[in-house]
Image (spheres, rainbow, N blue to C red):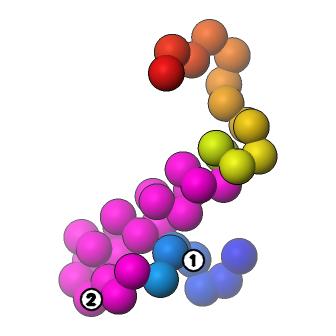
Amino acid sequence: HAPIGLDIGAASPAEIAVAVLAQTIHAFRSRGLETKGAVA
């Protein structure tokens, strides 16, 4: 996926990091790629 990160209007490096992590979490949750033994 490029560019990486959800389009949340991020401007600062910290906001960009949040957008990238948000996209990563979304990808894991929507595809069911949770690690074994993970507690929700």
Q: Position of residue 18 (x, y in %)?
A: 35, 64
Residue that label 1 marks = 4
The magenta region covers 8-27
- Whether residue 11 sits left or right of residue 9 in the image: it is left
- Whether residue 12 sits left or right of residue 39 in the image: it is left
Quadrant of residue 15 within the rendered picture: bottom left
What whole-number distance in Å separates the C-alpha atoms at marks 2 and 1? 14 Å
Residue at disc 1, secondary structure: loop
Q: Position of residue 37 (x, y in %)?
A: 62, 11
Q: Is residue 12 above or below residue 22?
A: below
Neighbours of disc 2 within 10 Å: few (<14), some (14-19), many (20+): few
Please check the rendered image and state whether residue 18 is part of the magenta-colored stretch, yes or no. yes
- Whether residue 4 sits left or right of residue 18 in the image: it is right
Q: Position of residue 20 (x, y in %)?
A: 47, 67
For this orientation, the residue located farthest to the right is 31
Q: Amino acid at mark 1?
A: Ile
Residue at disc 2, secondary structure: loop
Residue that label 2 marks = 11
Quadrant of residue 27 within the rendered picture: bottom right
Residue at 69% across / 16% down in the picture?
36
